Image (tube, grey):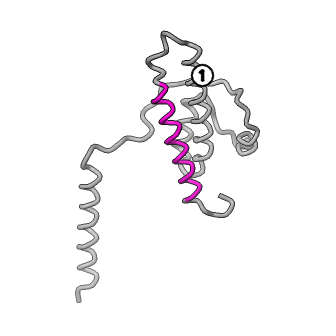
Amino acid sequence: MDASLYHQALGVLWTFIGHVNGYFHAQEPWRIVKTDKEAFIEILSATAHSLRIIALLLWPVLPKKMEELLFALGFKILNNENMIKDLVSEKWDHEFVLRKIDVLFIKPEAGVYESIMKEKMSEKEEKKDRVFSC
């Protein structure tokens, strides 16, 4: 980020998000909640800490969505809070109060994205034809 290579920084962050998602689904906490409470809590704790880090790092890019995510974890961004200092401290002693929220990002149905892109491309072609016709 300091070198203004935002696309690379976000790429690294998205890789981390993929790892966190993979970890959570591989651990299947919904299956072990009744048989191994300690492992269940450990999985949720590791995931919640990771989500908090993700929310703080993505906050400058997606402030409203990340504030929703932090709210779901029981946190709030304060005006004078030094978030980077907090992240660098590597403290894993935060307590989380998980709250149910609406879905942060809605995954479009199959084919919707393609139809939107085709529509935009045809609009561009129409505009292109109008601009260059004399």
Q: Does 24 appear in magenta?
A: yes
Image coords of residue 24 (percent x, y): 50, 30
Residue displayed at 71% across by 26% down? 93
Q: Height in image: 123 above or below 35?
A: below
Image coords of residue 37 (percent x, y): 55, 12
**Which residue is the extreme one toward the front?**
26
Residue 84 or residue 92, whichever sits in front = 92
Q: Image quadrant of residue 40? A: top right
Image coords of residue 100 (percent x, y): 48, 25
**Overall secondary structure of the magenta section:** helix
Residue displayed at 35% across by 42% down? 107
* 121 relative to 44 in the view: left or right: left
Q: Height in image: 39 above or below 85?
A: above
Q: Height in image: 49 above or below 106?
A: above
Q: Residues within 10 Å of mark 1 (few under 14, many from 20)?
A: few
Residue highlighted by disc 1: 42
Amino acid at the residue labelled 1: Glu
Give the position of the N terminus as an image quadrant: bottom right
Q: Does 23 appear in magenta?
A: yes
**SS assignment at label 1:** helix
Q: Magenta stretch?
A: 8-27
**Which residue is the extreme one toward the top?**
35
Give the position of the C terminus as an image quadrant: bottom left
Residue displayed at 44% across by 17% down? 31
* 119 relative to 101 in the view: left or right: left
